[in-house]
Amino acid sequence: MDIDDEDSKARRNLLVVSTAMILVWWLDVSADKVSARFLGLDASGPGFEWRVWLAMTVALFYFALRFHFSKAHVAHVKSLRIDLLRIAEIQLTKWLRLENNLRLRFVWMPTVLGDAFGLFMERAGKSIAQGHGLTEPLPVVRISVPAANYQTVAYTDGSQRMTLQSGSMRVQYFVQGPHGDQPSNEASLGFELRWLRQSIAWVRMWTWATIYSESSTSLLLPSLWAAFAAGLAGFKLASTW
């Protein structure tokens, strides 16, 4: 068996051991009965169940290390970073599109643009109004946010990481003109997020990445499954000591 073949099976082995440990706990399987039925061993000695759980914990730790240091794991981590960036920008775009249009109807609603929200709308309304020879700004009826992205920070190793503290969005205002809705010129506007919005964005990003992404099946769910099995093993070791 070559190294590449071993790497491809590292995740499978980790999932098998984790699932076996969780099933033993979930089905409340007695260690002494399993030993007597399948191994023909007398499990009447003291601390037998504790030794069984210790052996399973050691096996879980071993297969977790094999998965962590495998070539496949490195590829999965790179895929996760790409997925997180893609998911974060999709969610950010939808969020800002909804937020800006809700602000048109509910003037009390805060936005990432703060007080500048009204200034940008007024500027768009004035620009189109002047094109029709009007002096008063026309009302904005809809706001389009085609795309939005978070700011990236460059590191000394040449890599770039996404930060949830600030970003920019492309915005286009649709103004109610004399001959129907007219779009303004598209503008790129920067914004900053406070800690609460950053926290919400972080939770949404990781939740969606865990539920529905390529990285979920290749990295996140196996890691969470193994962590759950490790927690169960710690509990059983403590309770059977």
Image (spheres, grey):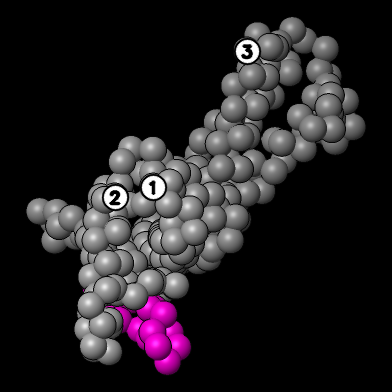
Q: Residues within 10 Å of mark 2 (few under 14, many from 20)?
A: few
Query: For the C terminus, which image quadrant?
Result: top right
Q: Position of residue 8 (x, y in %)?
A: 51, 63
The answer to whether residue 4 shows anywhere in this view is yes
Q: Do the residues labelled 2 and 1 touch (CB within 8 Å)?
A: yes
Q: Which circle's residue, 2 or 3, is located before the other in the chain? A: 2
Give the vertical position of 148 relative to 178 (above or below): above
Q: Name the residue under label 3.
A: 238
- Residue 36 falls in image quadrant: top right
Amino acid at the residue labelled 1: Pro
Which residue does the image show at 49% across and 59% down from the upper left? 105
Q: Mark 2 points at which residue?
A: 114
Which residue does the image show at 24% across and 56% down from the upper left? 116
Relative horizontal placement of residue 75, taking residue 113 as reference (left or right) = right
Question: Which segment did they paint magenta?
Answer: 172-188
Q: How far apart are marks 2 and 1 (CA)?
A: 6 Å
Q: Residues within 10 Å of mark 3 (few under 14, many from 20)?
A: few
Q: Name the residue under label 1.
A: 110
Relative horizontal placement of residue 158, taking residue 113 as reference (left or right) = left
Q: Which circle's residue, 1 or 3, is located before the other in the chain? A: 1
Amino acid at the residue labelled 3: Ala
Q: Where is residue 216 in the image (x, y as percent from the top left)?
A: 54, 57
Q: Where is residue 150 in the image (x, y as percent from the top left)?
A: 29, 59
